[in-house]
Image: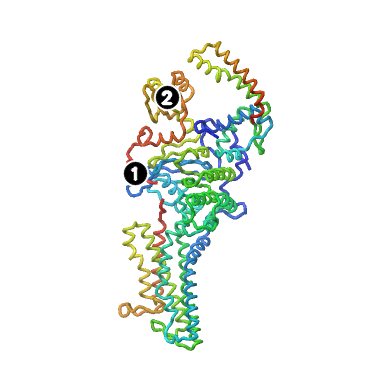
Amino acid sequence: MTDETMTEVVHQTFDPAGRPVGPPPLSTTAAITTIGHIGWLGWVWLTVAVLYGVAMIPISIFGDLDGNSPWQDAVGGWQQWLFYGAGITTVPTFAKMLITNGVTRAQVSRSSIIAMVILGVLGGIFVAGGLAVEGLIYDVNDWSRELRGGSTAPGFATIVGIGADSVLVLCAYFVAGWLSVAGFYRLGWVVGALFVPVAMVPAAFSELVLRVDVGTRIDVLDGVAPDLPSAVWSLSTVAVIAVATLGATWMTSEIELDN
Amino acid sequence: MTFPIATSPTSSGQTSTTPSGGFVVETSGLHVHFGRVRAIDDLSMRVAGGTICGILGRNGAGKSTLLSTIAAFRRPTSGRIEVDGDAPFENARLMSEICLVRESGDFEKGTTVGQVLELGEALRPRWDAGFAERLVERFALPRRMKAGKLSRGQRAALAVTVGLASRAPLTMLDEPHLGMDAPSRYAFYEELLADYAEHPRTILLSTHHIEEVASILEDVVIIHRGRVLMHRSAEDLRSEGVELTGPAEAVDAVTEGLRTLSERHLGRTKSVVVFEPFDGDRARRATEAGIDVGPIPLQDLFVHLTSDTNDATSNNGDTSDETRS
Amino acid sequence: MFDDRTPIYRQIADEIRHQILTGGLAAGDQVMSTTQYSTFHRINPATVAKAFQQLVDEDLLEKRRGIGMFVSEGAADRLRTRRRAAFVDDVVGPMMAEARRLGIATDDVLDAIRAVASTTAAAHTVTAGDQP
């Protein structure tokens, strides 16, 4: 190397535009994981909402839905599995994409946690918002609504509670998916497969103690578990999710990419 | 700004003493094992900052494993890697400043060419979007096409685009040119050299086709069975291998005590490849004895050096394990 | 354009020497920059720099800081003088050794040289100027 070619010292800390040079901030990587998930989850939500809306127009004109909740049927039972799938993509899609672009595993995990929470909250709003809108349709038609799980004419507090429970269930499934796939990366195929039931614990726990299937609560715990206020169950789910997230972060911290 | 020191006369033995502009890469006693397979087996080397260094080796020699370990895609089994003085694994500063692109591409199948570039722009501290744009045009990459639909050559061109536009102080290209056609490869070499001149950085380029890239390299590291077989300046390597052909006794007399890589016989004529500087007195004695002294092509030298029957240079011979890369 | 057997810096230096000798590069002419040369021929810039440095050491090129490399005053003459001095060793010596091996008498060699000289002199007047 010689003469006029040496015009720049690479170790500078500012780029030519005066911006500091350094690793990408968490906001950038969290935006990538979050938008990456919403990229497909959003389409599913939109499709369900549109189909629901299209179905409701003729029904509300000609039919009678007195007594049940089509929205509950529309969003219950499957949504958590989308989140399980989203959790699975954390490692093979997002960890790979980010690590190969120079992001640390620790930051991948933090970004995934942020994405999980944002997606969970959006999922909860989706569920609760639908119930609220449906309530308006029922009010207009003067139908009475009864949710599976026994809640009749659910009011604002009930709907918010169902939304909050949905957030936790969805997050629990997300972290279960993340743990499942991280197990395969860290423990190999055989042990990883055996680890999947362990990875499902957060999801199972949330199903047992919270109102699953959007508003219905499994009766398994009746008579077995002490009759505690639902806030206690919600908080214990938060704790389980937190522990599972720590575990997933720890397992992700040693992920190796294939050659 | 110029560096007067860079223009002072260089000493006769060409070593990489480029003053700045890129991370130093150093490994010592590095091991990377996959179960019982020792892909990297006690590898020590030091690549000077700001050089274009070729990592040469046969298939399975451990090139890809070495590069992906330096890039912190994996953790060493044991031993040490230092890039710019620190271990790269989970080091946020270093990882964002080390860019490894592999021939496989590592691109998510569903992302488009444009999205791949957006990711680079968002995540690479020194990304040059204008340069990336120019490369995309030069390689005629379809911006909206998904990575999974690209041809092998296009995928390689996209990898090269990402690698160059990142401007990372340590840029590593793992057999990037394998799938590219000749015009694309030439375009790649030209862009690499032009951008390197403007933005000096350390570039590691792995390949098992030495011939075409030899001229763009300053240093060459030959890896064999997970170890460094040889580390030379490319120019030294070029002048060190000679082939001596002549009467068997005369050839034997001249080559006594020298490191030979191969021998061939044709009647009473013997042909020996010697890997040592062969000039001055030795060359004169050989010529006087009626021996033809000829240089050998780099590719031949590489083949001789890494042939498994050649024990003169291979280490201990205790690594019979097949290695993978 | 570069063979892969000789150090490239030597090939680059030879090429520039050849251009100086044939008038392709005159005294005061600027030669390509390291970067231009490197990119154009796809060669590592350190290799190019080494070639240029060798030519600077031989007083054939001179560096003007911040501008580039230029052909030195009197470079062609210096080169020619040196080549003449080396002519006997480099060309005549090996030729006579070969002649001895083949059993060609020195007088016959001299005759052959005169014959070749007369034809190339004629040819040279035709092709001179074609060389870059």
Q: Which residue position is annotated with label 2? A: B245
Q: Are marks 2 and 1 in contact (CB under 8 Å)?
A: no
Query: Residue visible at 56% across and 47% down?
Result: A10
A257 over A36 or under it: above or below: above
Q: Amino acid under label 2?
A: Thr
Q: Earlier in the sequence, mark 2 or mark 1?
A: 2
Quadrant where the N terminus of chain A sits is top right
Query: Residue visible at 49% across and 49% down?
Result: B153
Checking the image for residue B322, the label placed there is 1
Q: Amino acid under label 1?
A: Glu
Image quadrant where residue B11 sits: top right
Task: Give x and y (percent) for residue B300.
Answer: 43, 34
The answer to whether residue A160 is visible is yes
Say yes or no: labels 2 and 1 on the same chain.
yes
Task: Give x and y (percent) for residue C106.
Answer: 54, 11
Task: Please tell me whether mark 1 sits on a helix, a strand or a loop.
Answer: loop
A71 over B271 or under it: above or below: below
Task: Give x and y (percent) for residue A26.
Answer: 51, 61
